[in-house]
């Protein structure tokens, strides 16, 4: 059993927001599930968003760049349609809703609307998406803004609160400390790192958006450094994210100080990655317990 931000989980493996989610996984896995101990939704904004223009994904050495741009249906459609379908797919698994905004008031509004909604176990504040032009990382790169948004959301809801931060900042410990001071129960380290792929014939980005987020194995050393530094400095609960694709890579982040880990890019290649890692991390059943 893993205790994360007050949530009792069967094991320490989650899905990363913005990757393969429960609804999409049902189409791939049928009656089977991703196997996450808690399911993190894609980031939802107050209003519907189309996301960035294509192309949205580019392969890079050992990893992936994405410029998805956080498309979504908006909070009303999420509560009425997406959340009930997600709960049907995950059963009793706790649902952590990822929220994003272009201003502090956006986060506050979303938290208020989700407070008390059946099936919402916790909130994750996305303060770190690198491929939208305003909000998120522009808030999460500033200590004062991170403190303010977390404090405002904390005053709005009693739900467990996680804050997701970027590795593309000057002082991850200071930002994590601001989140904790504002009332966060845990931090998620990290989101994707700023990255770019360029066409040599035009000198322009191969992606359609304003930039890209680097994920997969190249992100792992950045995530390890962030997790280790924050654990030593603050001792807060941490969800470690970045290049988790096996028992060995999950164990690295847990050894660095993560309370739990989240799997993202690896699920595109193998949707059973989460369930395989969770099974490998499960303690052996003793003869006495049988």
Image (cartoon, rainbow, N blue to C red):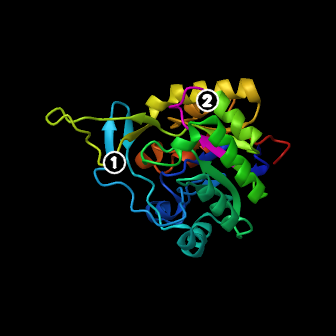
In the rendered image, residue 104, in percent from the top left (x then y), is placed at 61, 52
The extreme right residue here reads 288
Q: How crowded is mark 1: few (under 14 residues within 10 Å), some or many (20 or more)?
A: many
Mark carried by residue 172:
2
Mark carried by residue 209:
1
Kindly tell me whether residue 255 is visible in this rendering. no
Q: Kindly state the secondary structure of the residue where label 2 is placed.
A: helix
Quadrant occupied by the N terminus: top right
Q: Is residue 170 magenta?
A: yes
**Which picture quadrant has residue 265?**
top left
Up the image or down, 230 lies above or below 281; here it is above
- Given residues 255 and 181, the one toward you in this image is 181
Circles 2 and 1: CB atoms closer than 8 Å: no
Q: Residues within 10 Å of mark 2 (few under 14, many from 20)?
A: many
Up the image or down, 37 lies above or below 258; here it is below
Kindly tell me whether residue 120 is visible in this rendering. yes
Q: Which residue sits at x=35%, y=44%? A: 210
Q: For marks 2 and 1, give the CA distance.
A: 25 Å
The extreme bottom residue here reads 80
Q: Is 256 positioned to the left or the right of 247 in the image?
A: right
Q: What stretch is highlighted in magenta?
A: 162-172
Q: Is 155 positioned to the left or the right of 69 in the image?
A: right
Q: Kindly state the secondary structure of the residue where label 1 is placed.
A: loop
- Given residues 157 and 54, the one toward you in this image is 157
Q: Is 251 positioned to the left or the right of 51 in the image?
A: right
In the rendered image, residue 239, in percent from the top left (x then y), is placed at 65, 40
In the rendered image, residue 118, in percent from the top left (x then y), is placed at 71, 70
Looking at the image, is mark 2 or mark 1 earlier in the sequence? 2
The extreme left residue here reads 201
């Amino acid at each position: 059993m893993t205790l994360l931000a007050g949530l009792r989980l069967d094991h320490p493996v989650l899905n990363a927001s913005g990757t393969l989610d429960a609804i999409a996984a049902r189409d791939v896995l049928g009656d089977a599930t991703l196997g996450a101990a808690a399911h993190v939704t894609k980031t939802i904004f107050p209003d519907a968003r189309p996301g960035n223009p294509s192309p949205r994904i580019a392969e890079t050495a050992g990893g992936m760049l994405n410029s998805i741009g956080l498309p979504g249906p908006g909070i009303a459609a999420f509560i009425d349609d997406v959340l009930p379908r997600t709960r049907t797919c995950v059963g009793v698994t706790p649902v952590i809703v990822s929220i994003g905004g272009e201003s502090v008031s956006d986060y506050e509004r979303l938290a208020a609307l989700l407070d008390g909604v059946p099936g919402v176990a916790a909130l994750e504040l996305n303060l770190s998406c690198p491929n939208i032009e305003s909000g998120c990382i522009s808030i999460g790169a500033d200590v004062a803004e991170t403190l303010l948004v977390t404090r405002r959301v904390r005053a709005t809801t009693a739900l467990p609160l996680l804050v997701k931060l970027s590795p593309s900042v000057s002082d991850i410990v200071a930002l994590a400390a601001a989140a904790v001071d504002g009332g966060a129960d845990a931090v998620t380290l990290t989101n994707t790192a700023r990255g770019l792929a360029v066409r040599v014939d035009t000198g322009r980005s191969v992606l359609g958006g304003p930039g890209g987020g680097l994920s997969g194995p190249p992100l792992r050393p950045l995530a390890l450094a962030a997790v280790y530094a924050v654990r030593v400095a603050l001792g807060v609960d941490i969800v470690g994210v970045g290049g988790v694709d096996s028992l060995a890579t999950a164990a690295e982040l847990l050894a660095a100080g993560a309370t739990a880990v989240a799997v993202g890019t690896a699920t595109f290649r193998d949707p059973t990655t989460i369930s395989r890692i969770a099974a490998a991390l499960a303690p052996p059943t003793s003869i006495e317990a049988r």
